[in-house]
């Protein structure tokens, strides 16, 4: 009877372990499930709260849509666009209007000037249009009008109306000359805009990589928890079998301690695995900012629906480096900064030149007013016998028709002493250019190292996954063999539990290697700058 109980117990252990081997192999094969739409609501789960099934694509979409740091970075190119527009406003014409009305009363120094007090009233206004020219110069057109009324004696026109149309042109010939320097603010703003765009693309690459890392780590932690739970279940089943055998007298009581110790150890493993699941779940929730879409995110359990890939990707170091040199956003940003510093240096050299300006003016005055008629046509008599009224419009017509043509041409040379003595701005620009050159060279060297490490990690992790798969298969066979020996009484509980633990560890290591392989693929995409292209992701502003 004891022999039958022992054989029956061994058969149950063998069947349980065989089922465990089949179950343990499931996380390593990880059959892909259908992807869940981003809009699918969480499913209720009475034991663990709501369940939200998400694919990797769903998580990346949510991160791009909701991630606060990415949203903040997205505003930077828009700000840079506004800076370009602001710089371009330099070439929008400006209009200025000036009006002045004054009345002056001064003592008369001569009875010939006025009897007692000289009173003069004048109001005038000026309308001026100013336009900057892309080659560094400026053009202005102004119209000046005034009315002057005075009690001075011996005047022939009073009140007097005057108008002057003036055209001015100024062009630097040395310093600030040329289309490039005339548009300096716009060129710098465009460089900064392109740099901010590349920085945003870099942030987008990083967020995609962070999502993939968090997602695959969550997959690993959940599957690792399943392995630990099944391992505990097997230990508990073996413990129960040991109790039956001890009661039947076919097993010494000391064997019970071994099984109980193993159950406690595996319970502790489960607690650690559960904490790891929550940690990676919380990390993924923060990265995708799940709180922006749902309430009580602490009660939502994320269930990944994607499986890690086991397909080998062949990428050579030379190919990866060539792609990275062409597409890495941060490298593009540093190159743009170098070009910006080169432009600033050329501008600083230009500022060492003297300021020689060509100036051209062309103006046309017009005068009208009430003509005073004196006795005997002699103003010295001081006796006004009549007036011939004049019109304000006559002065304006004379100015606009260029009745009186005047012009002037000149050159102005200015030599600031600071450009001769200190040359501080030039020295500063030169140092900034050298600094940018060193940063570019350093980034290229750093890129070479990152590509080497990333390509090596992909190859290493793929080989690790294969090696750990072989180790898991061997652990399964060893456990099967040990169960056969246990069945016929040639093994012990300790050895069976040890082989169970070895199999669980082998399965965990295989899963970890597979997850590391997928994360290393994501990192290779990131260092090559192709994560967006591989995921076919482009971000379009709402504007």
Image (spheres, helix red, strand yellow):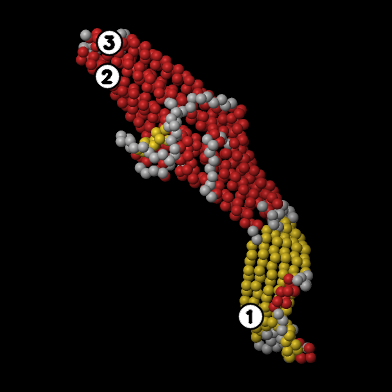
Query: Mark 3 or 2, which is nearer the eye?
Result: 3
The residue under the point 25% across, 19% down is 240
Q: Nearer the viewer, residue 91 or 304?
A: 304
Which quadrant of the structure image shows residue 455?
Answer: top right
Task: Return the residue at label 2.
Answer: 239
For the question of whether residue 159 can be seen, the reply is yes
Say whether residue 494 is visible.
no
Secondary structure, mark 3, is: helix
Residue 28: x and y in percent read 43, 23
Task: Rate crowding at label 2 as few (under 14), some (14 to 19) or many (20 or more) other CA atoms within 10 Å.
Answer: many
| Mark nearer the N terminus (2 vs 1) | 1
Could you tell me how far apart the alpha carbons at marks 2 and 1 are, in whole angstroms? 116 Å
**Distance between mark 3 and mark 2 Cα atoms:** 16 Å
Q: Residue at x 57, y 49 (%)?
A: 80
Residue 171 position within the rendered picture, expressed as x and y whole percent measured from the top left: 73, 58
- Mark number, residue 104: 1
Disc 3 target residue? 7
Please, is residue 49 above or below residue 466 in the view? below
The Cα–Cα distance between marks 3 and 1, rounded to whole angstroms, is 129 Å
């Amino acid at each position: 009877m004891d022999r039958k109980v022992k054989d029956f117990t061994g058969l149950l252990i063998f069947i349980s372990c065989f089922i465990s081997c089949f179950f343990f192999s499931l996380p390593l094969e990880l059959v892909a499930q259908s992807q869940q739409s981003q809009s699918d609501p969480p499913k209720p789960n009475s034991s663990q709260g709501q369940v939200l099934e998400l694919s990797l694509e769903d998580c990346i979409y949510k991160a791009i849509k909701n991630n606060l740091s990415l949203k903040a970075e997205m505003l930077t190119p828009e700000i840079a666009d506004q800076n370009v527009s602001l710089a371009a406003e330099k070439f929008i014409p400006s209009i200025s209007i000036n009006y002045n009305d004054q009345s002056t009363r001064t003592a008369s120094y001569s009875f010939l000037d006025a009897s007692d007090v000289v009173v003069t009233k004048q109001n005038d206004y000026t309308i001026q249009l100013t336009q900057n020219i892309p080659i560094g110069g400026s053009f202005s057109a102004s119209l000046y009008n005034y009315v002057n009324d005075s009690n001075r004696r011996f005047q022939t026109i009073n009140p007097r109306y005057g108008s002057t149309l003036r055209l001015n042109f100024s062009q630097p010939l040395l310093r600030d000359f040329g289309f490039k320097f005339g548009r300096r603010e716009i060129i710098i703003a465009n460089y900064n805009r392109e740099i901010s765009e590349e920085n945003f693309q870099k942030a987008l690459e990083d967020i995609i990589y962070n999502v993939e890392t968090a997602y695959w780590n969550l997959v690993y932690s959940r599957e690792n928890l399943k392995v630990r739970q099944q391992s505990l279940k097997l230990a508990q089943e073996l413990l129960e079998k040991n109790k039956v055998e001890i009661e039947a007298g076919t097993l010494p009581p000391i064997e019970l301690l071994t099984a109980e110790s193993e159950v406690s150890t595996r319970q502790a493993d489960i607690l650690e695995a559960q904490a790891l699941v929550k940690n990676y779940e919380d990390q993924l929730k923060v990265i995708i900012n799940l709180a922006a879409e749902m309430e009580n995110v602490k009660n939502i359990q994320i269930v990944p629906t994607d499986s890690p890939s086991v397909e080998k990707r062949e990428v050579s170091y030379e190919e990866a480096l060539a792609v990275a040199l062409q597409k890495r956003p941060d490298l593009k940003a540093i190159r743009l900064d170098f070009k910006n510093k080169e432009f600033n240096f050329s501008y600083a050299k230009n500022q060492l030149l003297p300021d020689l300006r060509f100036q051209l003016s062309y103006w046309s005055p017009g005068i009208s007013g009430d003509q005073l008629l004196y006795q005997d046509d002699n103003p010295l008599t001081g006796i006004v016998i009549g007036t011939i009224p004049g019109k304000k419009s006559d002065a304006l017509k004379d100015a606009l028709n260029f009745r009186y043509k005047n012009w002037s041409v000149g050159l102005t040379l200015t030599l600031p002493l600071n450009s001769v003595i200190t040359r501080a701005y030039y020295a500063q620009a030169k140092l900034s250019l050298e600094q940018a050159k060193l940063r570019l060279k350093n980034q290229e060297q750093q890129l070479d190292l990152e590509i080497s490490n990333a390509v090596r990690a992909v190859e290493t992790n793929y080989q690790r996954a294969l090696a750990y798969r072989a180790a898991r298969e061997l652990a399964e066979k060893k456990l099967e063999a040990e169960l056969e020996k246990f069945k016929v009484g040639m093994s012990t509980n300790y050895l069976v539990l040890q082989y169970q633990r070895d199999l669980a560890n082998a399965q965990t290591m295989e899963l970890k290697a597979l997850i590391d392989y997928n994360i290393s693929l994501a990192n290779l995409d990131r260092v090559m700058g192709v994560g967006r292209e591989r995921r076919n992701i482009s971000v379009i502003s709402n504007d």
